[in-house]
Image: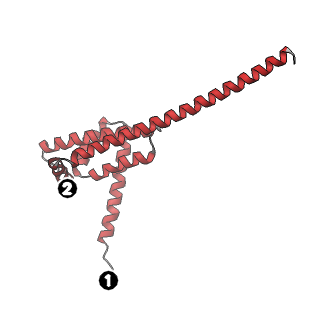
Amino acid sequence: MNLETIYYVGQSIAVIAILASLAFVGYQTRQTNRFARTELTRALLAETREFADSISTSPEMSAFMFEAQRAKEPLPPERFYRLAMYYASWFTAVESAFKINEEGLMEPSVYEHIRGTTRTMDCVNLRIWWEHARPYHPRDFADDVDASFAMWDRERAKSEVVALKPKATP
């Protein structure tokens, strides 16, 4: 074995070592991204759970939200302001989830779950608040919320049609 052959064998071993280290770095990066994605999702879900708990554990807040959600007419301004602060906080969390989902850092099913919880708030007061708040949100998020409202309206209309159909008598 001459010196030139030893040189080429050494170069080949070095290339293999470099490729192996690059593969390991890629694996580590993938694991780190998976961990970060999990942590973002966990933190956002904890925030939404904490938000819901703040309502459900307070009898006064639960009663207020129940009244606001069932109202057929807009609340008086002083009560609407309180509700608007709640909506603003909630939609900030939903918008954060939207952005994280758009970046691919959250499982889409988790975003759909968070967005879906907004449906429980759908009422005349939410729609009034959204008309005023919409311009202050990014267009893509606002379009997503509008699409949700349109879907809910279609589903509600379908269920009302089904409810209005006369039942067959046996």
Name the disc covering residue 70, or none: 2
Q: The disc labelled 2 sits on which kind of residue?
A: Arg
Residue at 36% x, 40% y: name it.
Answer: 44
Name the disc covering residue 13, or none: none
Res. 27 visible in picture: yes
Please identify the quarter of the rendering in which residue 96 is found.
Answer: top left
Q: Helix, strand, or loop for circle 1?
A: loop
Q: Pointer 2: residues within 10 angstroms few (<14), some, or many (20+)?
A: few
Q: Is residue 66 above or below residue 162?
A: above
Q: Pointer 1: residues within 10 angstroms few (<14), some, or many (20+)?
A: few
Image quadrant in which the N terminus is located: top right
Task: Left or right? Give the position of 156 relative to 82.
Answer: right
Q: Is residue 166 above or below residue 155?
A: below
Residue 26 horizontal/vertical position (percent): 58, 31
Name the disc covering residue 169, or none: 1
Residue 81 horizontal/vertical position (percent): 17, 41
Q: Helix, strand, or loop for circle 2?
A: helix
Distance in Å between CA atoms under marks 1 and 2: 33 Å
Q: Nearer the viewer, residue 133 or 118?
A: 118
Residue 84 horizontal/vertical position (percent): 21, 41
